[in-house]
Amino acid sequence: MDPLVALRSAIAAKLQPVLVRGGQVVDDNEIASAEALRFPPVPGISEEETDVPLSTETRFESKDPETRPLDLRTVYNCWITRDLNVTNYITVSAERGIFNLKFLERTDLLTWLEGASEDSENIITEGKKQVKSKQGESESKAGGKKELDPTLRAVYDKERTLVDHNTVLRGAKKISFASVSTECRQKIIFPYKSAAKTGKPVQSTTTKGSGASADDAKSRKKEPIIILSPSASALLNMANVKQFFEQGRFEYQPSASGAANIQYITRKSQKLGGQIRLVVVNSVDRFKPEYWDRVVAVFVTGQPWQLKPYKWSDPHVLFQQVLGFSLVFKGDPLPPTLKQWNVDVIPIDRNHRFKDSELVERIWDKIEYNLHKRGYKGRR
């Protein structure tokens, strides 16, 4: 069965293929982890359901800038994201770890799948295969693969996606402003209603007290934030993070149940000129949009699901904005994702504790340097 023809025929017959993992049907959003695409019986193609592995190569070739055949996963991802604009398509594909097509190739593929065109210059037919075979033979006789023109390569390297003002202003992800509404009710509406009932004037929330108290309140609002992984396999959790950062000693606690959902760690920093206090959390469920400007570091275990609720869910973008750390036992195999992400892997001994303080200082040095670049100062 030709997967391209099968997909086009199913679309024409308005028969929806489904993704399959472990024999079970999964949602289209789980295409990255799905194993196969299940086609329903399609007239002229198959009389029964057929599962085609998503790793199957198709006859559609991308020239980006080197020629490569697309697998069925890339083709189907292009189809299910057909209603997204170019920017959102690229973002979604990157989050799923799936190759994204250039604009012209994507348009060509979608046009062919929808049946709006009968031919595609990117789909290899038997005639094109014979021509390519002859070209390959002639190239091998001439001395190997033809080099890409340097000018054309320079154009490809500088190619960028244009975004319109709607994309820039609205973004690709939905942001809830419910916290703004709640704060408005608590600080503005409720006080005025209470004042109307009692007859007392409303005290302005902007009334200035002593300079010290105002500065303290301002500094509390801007305390840097460290985010830990909520994974049960994380070595650093809410139960041992305070001892780790303040005392320079790691104590393995496989379960953080019963620990507070927020911790405060303090340190006297010479680099920042005084005492600093950082907030440590392992969940961003209650994060306001402005909190992300205060995040200085994220500890990960290499599991992509941890980053999904973050403002920057793409690890390559996230770790350009904040520091990334991963605490692992020395000698344990590293998840492949950690090698791809821009994170500092901290190997810690499973039994011996005499090097703990050295590792902690190494982390503190990077955090303090980052805070110094942001203009953060300690309290004397």
Image (spheres, rainbow, N blue to C red):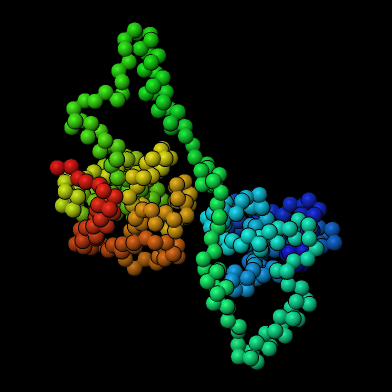
Examine the rendering and report whether any part of residue 25 can be seen: no
For image coordinates 28% across by 42% down, the residue present is 223
Camera-side residue: 233 or 313? Answer: 313
Residue found at the far front of this picture: 151
Question: Where in the figure is residue 35, as x and y percent of width and height?
Answer: 62, 61
For image coordinates 68% across by 88% down, the residue present is 137
Residue found at the far right of this picture: 44
Camera-side residue: 103 or 43? Answer: 103
Where on the picture, by quarter, is residue 147?
Answer: bottom right
Number of numbered tags placed on the structure image: 0
In the picture, measured across the screen, residue 299 lies left or right of residue 8, that is left
Question: Where in the figure is residue 191, as x and y percent of width and height?
Answer: 36, 17
In the picture, measured across the screen, residue 2 lies left or right of residue 219, that is right
For image coordinates 58% across by 78% down, the residue present is 148
For image coordinates 25% across by 55% down, the residue present is 369
Examine the rendering and report whether any part of residue 66 can be seen: yes
Question: Where in the figure is residue 156, as x and y percent of width and height?
Answer: 55, 68
Where on the picture, by quarter, is residue 211?
Answer: top left
User: Image height check: is 285 above or below 67?
Assistant: above
User: Image height check: is 125 above or below 211?
Assistant: below
